[in-house]
Structures are given as C-alpha cells and as structure tokens.
C-alpha cells in the first residue's frame, strides 16, 4: 500500500523540519519556495516507510550545499535539484555498463541527507518529477554542517560518485561537477571550495551516497521516520499556537534550555558556511549559542560547562510558536531554546568524533556530554 503526504502535511513538514534543522538547513522562507515548487506539480507526495524499502532496489541521497544565508535567498529549485539526481543516475548506469555487468540500473527512492526543509523539499521535488517515493528517514534526524557527519558516511556508504550542480541552465552558465573520491570529508571540502566561486554563489544541489536497500538496512545507517516526525511537530505547533513550546517539549520529551530576548547576532560567511554567535538574555542571565550553519554548542552565564552540544538538537521557537532559523532571527526577538536528545544513530563513536572537531573550532576542548547527562549535573 502506497503512502502519501497531502498539502496540509507538507505545510506541517515545513514547520517541523525548520525546527529539526537546529537553526540551519535554510529558513522557512527558502523552504516555502521549495514547497511551493512541489505544490505547483502535485498536491500529494509519495513516501516510503523504512520497513517497506525493497532491499533489492537502489536509491541516492540529496543534499543542499552552501551557506544558510545564500540558501535562504537561493535554494536549489527548478534546474539543480532534478538535474543532479538524473546526472548521478546516468553516471551510475555508465559505470555499471563499463564493468560489463548486465541489467537495467535505476534509482527507485530518493533519500534526504538530513532533517531540514531544504533536504526534504529537494527530495520531494525530485520524487514527484521522477515518480519515485521519498524515504521516511534521513542521515541525521537533525541538520549538520558537513557531509561526513551523516549516518551514511558513518556506516561506510561510498559518497561517490557525487554530483554537484548549480541552479543555472546549461546554456546560461550552468555547471555540473562529478566527483570520484572515497572520503566524504574531501568531497565536502571540494564542494565548499567550489561553492565560494561566483558561478555557484554559495548554493548548489548535491546527489551522492548511492546504495541498495540492503545497505540501508545496516545498523545505524539511517534515522527512521523523520519526515513523519517533522509532520507531527508541525501539526502540534499548528494546533497549539499559544502553547507550542509545551506541546513540542511534550511530543519530543525535550528540554527547555532557556528563554529570553536576542540581544546580539554576529555572523560571517566563510568557506561555504555561515559561522556565528547568538546571544539571548533574560534578566541577569545570558546564553551564547555558537553555530556553523547549525547550532553546535550553548554556553550559559550561570554554568562553567556547556548546557547543550551537538549532536543533540539545539532548536528555537519564537514567541509566536513558530520555529526560527539563524538567518531569519532579529535582535529583540523573544525565543525559547529547546534541547532534544540525539537519535541513537547519531551517537556512535564516528559521529561524536566528527562533531568533536567542531567543538575545537569553537575553543571547547572537552568531550561530548549527552544532554540527558548535562541535565543531571
């Protein structure tokens, strides 16, 4: 039996995915542009639950690459999204033919790299045009700054061939890059270098991590049921506009970390990332939220240790109950900072080591301490 999201579900997924993106993953404005592009084609989107994935079929992962600021204004849409997926599929077919293996190769599912409006609606846009379902699952259950931080990389799914394309048509400056490189870290570095050039302008569509359904069933390969989770978050926000914080915390068994007014926002675009600090104040107390596209670590004026750190989710809700991204917030805005414990697939040694490198860039040299343990200190 096929499963579908209807138009109301898409609106709820937009809201829920902006929350799960931990301040990154493009704003609700950019996400709505992509959602509208989907709704211009159809009023329903097919998805496939993890347990219904055919182990003998193939799939690939979609990712939006670039700084959150650029993706807010210029998300991959009409040309880049589908073109990157089709080019990857064609590349894989040629690779199969070159080995002398017989049989038709096609990609039967499209998989979001992370929980974000950008990744979800990129996949939906490709799915509805190719008439294939989107997986109800992704590579993080949250958004993250680097490809190497996804669960697919953690279990050894090859990132290459990886295809990066910009949004321009080929006869008007369109650019397509095919990368063959085993390391997802290196592919990420190559993409960031290219994204900094004028022809890409810090926004592009990536397709890679092609795999079989059998590979998807490896332990810790994917975080399951994330699109339906985003839908459920958006639904409780919509149905409880005056009590959204309490409703979301109850649904996710989450933790309220802080609430107050934004008193300072510092941000710079560097190496294909938005890197910044958000300061929230309530009375004499302050928190500093450090981000690299996504929120990575939170310091409080009341504590001598971080009060939350990735891969646990660090998310915002505004005083109107709606989720807020780092590129969309303003000074004076009242926010509630919410912490959500990371899914188990994002707490493996590999993933923690990846995030530890980011801690050091923010001058924290200690270990990862899970949110549930910090709350007991």
Image (spheres, helix red, strand yellow):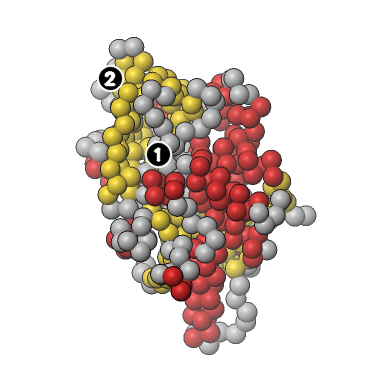
3D distance between C-alphas at marks 2 and 1: 24 Å
Which of the 4 image quarters holds residue 264? Answer: top left
Q: Is residue 47 visible?
A: no
Dot 2 and dot 1 residues touching (CB under 8 Å) = no
Residue 332 x/y as whole percent: 38, 22
Q: Is residue 289 visible?
A: yes
Question: Judging from the image, what secondary structure is the residue with disc 1 in?
Answer: loop
Q: How many neighbours does mark 1 have within 10 angstroms: few (below 14), some (14-19), or many (20 or more)?
A: many
Residue 33 x/y as whole percent: 55, 48
Which of the 4 image quarters holds residue 364? Answer: top left
Residue 301 image label: 2
Q: Where's the N terminus, which quadrant?
A: bottom right
Circle count: 2
Q: Where's the C terminus, which quadrant?
A: top left
Mark 2 or mark 1, whichever is nearer to me = 1
Residue 84 x/y as whole percent: 49, 66
Q: Nearer the viewer, residue 80 or 207?
A: 80
């Amino acid at each position: 039996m096929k499963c579908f999201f209807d138009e109301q579900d898409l609106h709820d997924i937009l809201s829920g995915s902006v929350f799960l993106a931990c301040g990154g993953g493009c704003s609700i404005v950019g996400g709505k542009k992509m959602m509208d592009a989907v709704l211009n084609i159809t009023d329903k989107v097919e998805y496939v639950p993890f347990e219904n994935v055919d182990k003998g079929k193939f799939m690939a992962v979609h990712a939006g690459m670039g700084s959150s600021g650029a993706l807010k204004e210029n998300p991959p849409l009409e040309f880049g999204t589908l073109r990157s997926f089709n080019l990857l599929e064609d590349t894989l077919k040629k690779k199969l033919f070159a080995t002398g293996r017989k049989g038709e190769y096609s990609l039967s599912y499209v998989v979001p790299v992370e929980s974000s409006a950008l990744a979800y609606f990129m996949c939906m846009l490709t799915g509805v045009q190719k008439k294939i379902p989107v997986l109800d699952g992704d590579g993080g259950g949250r958004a993250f700054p680097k490809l190497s931080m996804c669960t697919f990389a953690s279990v050894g799914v090859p990132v290459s061939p990886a295809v990066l394309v910009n949004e321009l048509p080929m006869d008007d400056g369109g650019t397509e890059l095919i990368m063959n490189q085993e390391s997802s870290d290196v592919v990420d570095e190559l993409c960031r270098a290219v994204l900094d050039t004028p022809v890409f302008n810090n926004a592009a569509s990536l397709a890679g991590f092609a795999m079989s359904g059998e590979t998807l069933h490896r332990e810790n390969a994917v975080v399951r049921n994330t699109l339906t989770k985003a839908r459920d978050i958006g639904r409780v926000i919509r149905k409880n506009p005056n009590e959204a914080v309490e409703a979301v915390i109850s649904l996710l068994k989450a933790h309220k970390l802080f609430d107050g007014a934004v008193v300072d926002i510092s941000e710079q675009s560097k190496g294909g990332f938005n890197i910044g600090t958000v300061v929230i104040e309530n009375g004499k107390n302050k928190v500093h939220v450090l981000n690299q596209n996504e929120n990575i670590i939170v310091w409080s004026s009341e504590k001598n240790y971080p009060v939350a750190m990735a891969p646990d989710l660090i998310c915002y809700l505004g005083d109107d109950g709606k989720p807020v991204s780092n590129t969309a917030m303003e000074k004076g805005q009242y926010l509630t900072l919410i912490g959500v414990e990371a899914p188990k697939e994002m707490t493996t040694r590999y993933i923690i080591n990846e995030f530890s490198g980011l801690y050091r860039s923010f001058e924290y040299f200690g270990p990862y301490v899970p949110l549930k343990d910090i709350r007991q200190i």
